[in-house]
Image: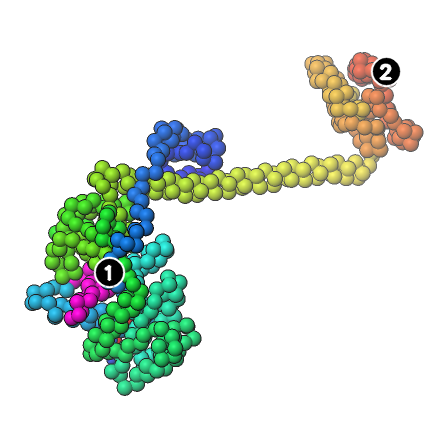
Amino acid sequence: DIDHVYEALLNTSLDIDLLEPESPLDDIWIKEVLKKSGKKYKRAQLKQEKVRENKDAVRRPEADPAFLIPRFPVVTIMGHVDHGKTTLLDKLRKTQVAAMEAGGITQHIGAFLVSLPSGEKITFLDTPGHAAFSAMRSRGAYLTDIIILVVAAEDGVMKQTVESIQHAQNAQVPIILAINKCDKPEADPERVKKELLTYDVVCEEYGGDVQAVHISALKGDNLMALAEATVALAEVLELKGDPTGLVEAVVVESRTDKGKGPVTTAIIKRGTLRKGAVLVAGKSWAKVRLLFDENGKTISDACPSMPVEIIGWKDLPSAGDEILEVESEQRAREVVDWRKYVKEQEKMKEDFKVIETKRKEHEDSRRRAWEKLGSLQWKEREYIKYQDIKKLQNVKPKEKIEDLNTLPIIIKGDVDGSVEAILNVINTYDAADECKLELLHFGVGDINENDINLAATFNAVVYGFSVNASKVIQQLAVKKRVRIKLHNIIYRLVEDLQEELSGKLTPSV
Ligand code: GDP
């Protein structure tokens, strides 16, 4: 009941001041709850006035293809657990570090860039569970250009292999097959390729366009061939990016660094990110203080496809959040305020739903209780009636109960109104008089057998107002020595009653 609802209210973050004027909750009811909670109630006209126009940051329209320049691919490695994804990523990362001058420190920041001797580059996403990939997928924007599907040569296609393929197909991201653990004697790469045909992953030798590379992540065998296959596919895809204008990027990882504060790793989608840029992501914003690469080196700028660590966030954005550059800090604050407000509204709507459900439950249980009570009362009435009839049928008058001080009567009238009028008169009868009127029964309708039986039992007089007593009833009355008195004028009936009373007082016998 109401306590339940009250609890529900307390469990929500509902700020009473924020109640929407168009809330479906009815005022009275909510006041009842709020009175109990001790919270103040006022509907939010104020807030309503404050409803701002949408001031969210917006993505720029698609760039003119003429201004686009080639960019390198962003790659996600997917596959079944234990098939060697981590080993492969580590090897790729280390190869890169080894190729650089000493002092490079590899740290896991969610993405890293690999430069090939040919000068080509590949960005690898290295996020746990590919959170960023999924988050972006659900928004219809994809961070990944190519998926490297790792399948262990001795194990073949497994559950997560199939899931990865479905991911790729749903997102329409092309696959490169990395058949791993080829160093193992039991490795059977050809079996893997055959198995994959079932899932519409058709390798080149079967007439499809999926490149398959036999590798050993553990030994580092053929990793260059894998990288070259990736570059070749990127060329076919003709990946282009727009290095100008306001930056658009995606958060791939987010953490709080002791020294740097909130840090994100992002992949640039568009524009060129530089120090001093003002960014918004989720409900946070940043004035970019520093940019780092995955080796912890500061960089001056980051162009499309590049992974970059961004320092300068006020709060921590989430992996998968889209980063948009805005013109000014003022604008960034506006955007974040707006987003918080929208979120607040959504939360409120959720809270209202909870309360509304509780209210309905409360109402329902009340209605059910009333229905139950109603039928109970009805049953009780029926039962009492039944008892009356039983009583009347069973009681056999052994002797007449004569009480000189009471006059038992039964009153029958034609309509409720007349019966009521007579009862009113009886009520005004002065009980101080020595003889009491005893109303045994009253009702609407002609005088019937029950009336006569009842009257016979208690030696009562049956008064009828504008009703009939049939021949049969009259004969029964005579037989049982019951007197029936029929009247059509109320005051006559009353006079009659008074005469009866005085007759009792002065027994004529
Ligand atoms: P993940 O779960 O897909 O990330 O798989 P891991 O990279 O953690 O690899 C799982 C196990 O397979 C580890 O014991 C690796 O050492 C081993 N492994 C990975 N790649 C190879 C490989 O090319 N050859 C062999 N023999 N073992 C490998």
Judged left or right of residue 225, residue 344 is right
In the rendered image, residue 78 lying in the magenta stretch gets the answer no
Judged left or right of residue 86, residue 476 is right
What is the spatial separation of the Cα atoms under label 2 and label 1, in whole angstroms? 128 Å
Front-most of residues 323 and 337: 323
Q: Which residue is drawn at 47% across and 35% down?
A: 25
Colour scheme shown: rainbow
Q: Where is residue 162 in the image (x, y as percent from the top left)?
A: 38, 70
Residue under pointer 1: 71
Confirm whether residue 488 shows in the render.
Answer: yes
Which region of the structure is painted magenta? 107-129
Q: In the rendered view of the protein, which quadrant contains the C terminus?
A: top right
Q: Which residue is drawn at 16% across and 53% down?
A: 301
Q: Is residue 150 above or below residue 402?
A: below
Q: Residue at x 30, y 85 (%)?
A: 186
Which mark, by number, is residue 508? 2
Q: What element carries label 1?
A: loop
Confirm whether residue 311 shows in the render.
Answer: no
Q: How crowded is mark 1: few (under 14 residues within 10 Å), some or many (20 or more)?
A: many
Q: Position of residue 174 (x, y in %)?
A: 34, 67
Q: In this view, does 41 lie above or below 200?
A: above
Q: Position of residue 287 (x, y in %)?
A: 18, 45
